[in-house]
Image (cartoon, grey):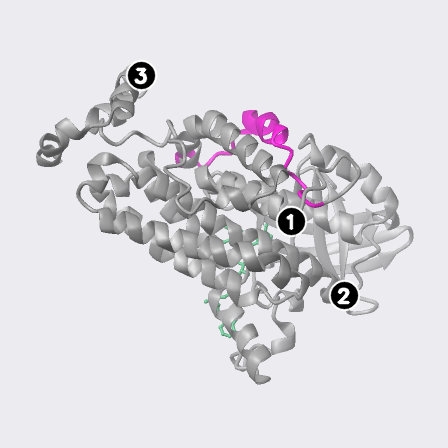
């Protein structure tokens, strides 16, 4: 590192120098160690819009992009590494995230933003550019809202959506169980009909925001029909507990929980009338897949911006070009096709392919930063880790590939232990 520092000393750019002095009293460790590489707490402006994608956006989309970008760079970047390392959620920034007006994206009315699908996706990508935990937090929360909007009664929408849109109440979405992830449609949590309501009994795993959520959408098997139904469970319901899953390697600010449901009573009015079977759950997942696939694009863009430093590109311009061209390829694909593919519900492998390619992009960035690519202060190592759970959580690459394979050949190649019909996708 010493040799590199002296080699590049006269190439230190002015912003990095001023960052060094500004940060001197705030975070001595990082700035002193390597002033050329501005830490991610001072997030750089976008390095370039080389292909001028902004020109393709509508004015609504551009406004969303800039508003989200400003908030993320100003409010989240300075605190994110600290909270990521502590694996804690920064509750104090929730009002700032709320002010971005992105929660519930496409939902119209009930105080929701009513954005186009592209504006919502661009907004989520901008959040992920700075911090993938925040984009996942908003995504899971919005999935709760979307389920209520698509499958809830009019009374549910009026009761829950306005406060969820403002993030004054927080949602979580609980499908996965310890033994049923890819195979979620075979889930075992039961809903038994009793007078005036339902009794939920079972377990959920990995549920984002569940340790503090006010509104929990829980999927359970109706023991009368043997079909999957959806229920709204409120925080502190007797018999409900959620225990934080510790030691995650990525998305460490997101609080994923193991939920235990022990004879949890849900009144009749809190059953979602629009969830009669697993097919209805899939409708929500179809929208979610569009959104999730924009996260790797946003994360990769942030990594490019962090790598776009004079001291780095003097040495490895080829890496930068390679990272940029991969991002642009993904962006082009998504921009043109996401809405079309979503309307045809054919986004399975596309989403998995984008996160798989982003893994390659981020490993280039990680390598380019050398030793600094192994510490979270400079974003790239953090982004590299954050992508791993994203690569898994919207259906694994294998499952997405198998589902697409079944569609194009008509033959299901799922492992015998699982049936194709039982796959979550
Ligand atoms: C950080 C994080 C956040 C999450 N948030 C949520 C949330 O908020 N709500 C929620 O409901 N869920 C959530 N999940 C769960 C997520 O959807 C599942 O982890 C995912 O669907 C994979 O399921 P699994 O982990 O049980 O893996 P498994 O299904 O056990 O898969 C293990 C391996 O087996 C392979 N495999 C499985 N089935 C087959 C088959 N038939 N043929 C061939 N190979 C197969 C898989 O590809 C994988 O490699 C989250 C997960 C993570 C990691």
SS assignment at label 2:
loop
Q: Residues within 10 Å of mark 3 (few under 14, many from 20)?
A: few
Q: In the rendered view, does 355 fall on the left or right side of 240? A: left
Tell me which residue sits at (52%, 82%) in the image: 413
Tell me which residue sits at (45%, 56%) in the image: 330
- Mark 2 close to ligand 1, CB under 8 Å: no
Point out the frontmost of discs 1 and 3. 1
Question: Residue 255 or 293: which is nearer the viewer?
Answer: 293
N-terminal label among 3 and 2: 3
Question: Residue 40 or 261: which is nearer the viewer?
Answer: 40
Which quarter of the figure is the N terminus placed in? top left
Q: Is residue 188 above or below residue 268?
A: below
N-terminal label among 1 and 3: 3
SS assignment at label 3:
helix
Q: Is residue 160 magenta?
A: no
Q: Is residue 131 above or below residue 144?
A: above
Tell me which residue sits at (75%, 54%) in the image: 200
Residue sticking out furthest to the right: 195
Whether residue 250 is visible: no
Instruction: Determine which residue is flagged by label 3.
Output: 22
Point out the frontmost of discs 3 and 2. 3
- How far apart are the alpha carbons under marks 3 and 2? 57 Å
SS assignment at label 1:
helix
Q: Position of residue 347 (x, y in %)?
A: 58, 64
Instruction: Determine which residue is flagged by label 1.
Output: 117
Instruction: Determine which residue is flagged by label 2.
Output: 277
Q: Position of residue 112 (x, y in %)?
A: 73, 38
Q: Are the residues flagged by discs 1 and 2 in contact, CB closer than 8 Å?
A: no
Instruction: Identify the image quadrant of residue 106.
Output: top right
- How far apart are the alpha carbons under marks 1 and 3? 39 Å
The residues colored magenta run: 85-106
């Amino acid at each position: 590192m010493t040799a590199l520092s002296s080699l590049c000393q006269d190439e230190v750019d002015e912003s990095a120098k001023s960052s060094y002095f500004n940060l001197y009293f705030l975070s001595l460790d990082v700035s002193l160690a390597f002033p050329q590489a501005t830490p991610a707490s001072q997030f750089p402006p976008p390095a370039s819009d080389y292909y001028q994608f902004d020109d393709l956006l509508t004015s609504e989309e551009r406004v969303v992009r800039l508003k989200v970008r400003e908030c993320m760079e100003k409010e989240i970047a300075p605190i994110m590494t600290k909270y990521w390392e502590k694996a804690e959620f920064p509750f104090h920034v929730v009002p700032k995230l709320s002010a971005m007006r992105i929660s519930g994206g496409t939902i119209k009315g009930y105080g929701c933003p009513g954005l186009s699908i592209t504006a919502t996706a661009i907004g989520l990508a901008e959040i992920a550019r700075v911090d993938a935990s925040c984009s996942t937090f908003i995504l899971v929360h919005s999935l709760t809202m979307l389920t209520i909007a698509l499958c809830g009664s009019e009374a549910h929408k009026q009761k829950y959506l306005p406060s969820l849109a403002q993030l004054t109440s927080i949602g979580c979405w609980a499908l996965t169980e310890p033994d049923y992830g890819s195979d979620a449609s075979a889930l075992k949590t039961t809903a038994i009909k009793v007078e005036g309501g339902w009794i939920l009994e079972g377990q959920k795993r990995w549920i984002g925001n569940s340790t503090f959520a006010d509104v929990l959408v829980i999927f359970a098997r109706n023991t009368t029909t043997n079909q999957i139904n959806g229920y709204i469970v409120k925080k502190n319901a007797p018999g409900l507990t959620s225990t934080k899953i510790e030691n995650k390697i990525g998305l460490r600010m997101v609080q994923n929980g193991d939920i235990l449901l022990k004879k949890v009573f849900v009144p009749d009015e809190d059953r979602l009338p629009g969830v009669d079977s697993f097919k209805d759950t899939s409708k929500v997942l179809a929208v979610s897949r569009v959104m999730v696939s924009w996260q790797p694009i946003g994360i990769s863009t942030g990594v490019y911006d962090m790598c776009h430093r004079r001291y780095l590109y003097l040495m490895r311009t080829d890496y930068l070009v390679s990272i940029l061209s991969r991002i642009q390829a993904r962006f082009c694909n998504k921009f043109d096709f996401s809405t079309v593919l979503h309307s045809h519900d054919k986004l399975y492998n596309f989403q998995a392919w984008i996160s798989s390619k982003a893994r390659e992009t981020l490993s280039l960035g990680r390598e380019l930063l050398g030793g600094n690519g192994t510490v979270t202060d400079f974003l790239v190592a953090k982004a590299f880790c954050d992508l791993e759970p994203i690569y898994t959580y919207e259906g694994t690459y294998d499952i997405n590939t198998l589902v697409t394979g079944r569609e194009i050949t008509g033959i299901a190649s799922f492992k015998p232990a699982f049936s194709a019909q039982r796959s979550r996708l």
